Image (cartoon, grey):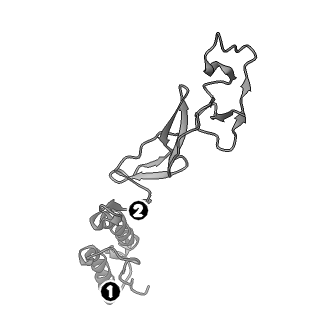
Amino acid sequence: MVILYNAHHMTGEYLQGRNSAARQNPMWRPETHNTDECWLYNPQTSSLQPPPETGDHEVAVLENGLWVVKPDHRKEVYFDTATQTRHEINDIGIELDPAWTEKEPLSNSKWNGTDWAVDFALWLESVVRPQRDSKLTACDYRMMPDFPMDAEKKTEWEFYRQALRDLPSQLAEVVNPIPWPLAPAQ
């Protein structure tokens, strides 16, 4: 029995386990036809030749009647280490960019060559300062000259607000939770 090695009609990838028996061409005559014409098959979706062995992340693909090995990273997700752009691979033959990683980026992070590291300056600008500004805005009204508050309480709020302003310059690394100063009792 002659085996046909079948390929997917859209992708051309070898359909492992879906081999079939080739049927003999009833019109074939050894004196008028070459041996390849002995069997009935579609050279776009099947081959009389077995596909080559493939490794991890590879697939055999039938192209123009010949098997070729192509990279296969379908259903895998990678992230660009420069832009943090997400790349979801959906097609056969996509070569991985050396600047891609499987590790998902962290918020406010940069690639350090082996992993995502939170960028301290970026963290200060995008996390600490906006939260600090929000806390200052929430108590702005207490500093208005017409807000009813005794001098001792006003001094407590002034110290609190100054501690909020000073906090970004006192931090030396990314910390979670952020050590916010405690607001005075109301």
Is 20 placed left or right of 60 in the picture?
right
Task: Answer left or right for 48 relative to 124.
Answer: right
Q: Secondary structure at mark 2?
A: loop
Dot in front, 1 or 2? 2
- The image's mark for residue 107 is 2
Q: Is residue 15 left or right of residue 62?
A: right
Residue 110: horizontal and vertical position, in percent? 32, 60
Which residue in the structure is indicated by mark 1? 156
Position of 111 relative to 34 (above/below): below
Position of the N terminus, as image quadrant, is top right
Mark linked to residue 8: none
Q: Nearer the viewer, residue 102 or 118?
A: 102
Q: Amino acid at mark 1?
A: Glu
Tell me if 71 is positioned left or right of 156 in this view.
right
- Residue 27: x %, y % from top left: 73, 13
| Figure quadrant of residue 122 | bottom left
Residue 76 percent location from the top left of the image = 51, 51
The answer to whether residue 2 is above or below residue 34 is below
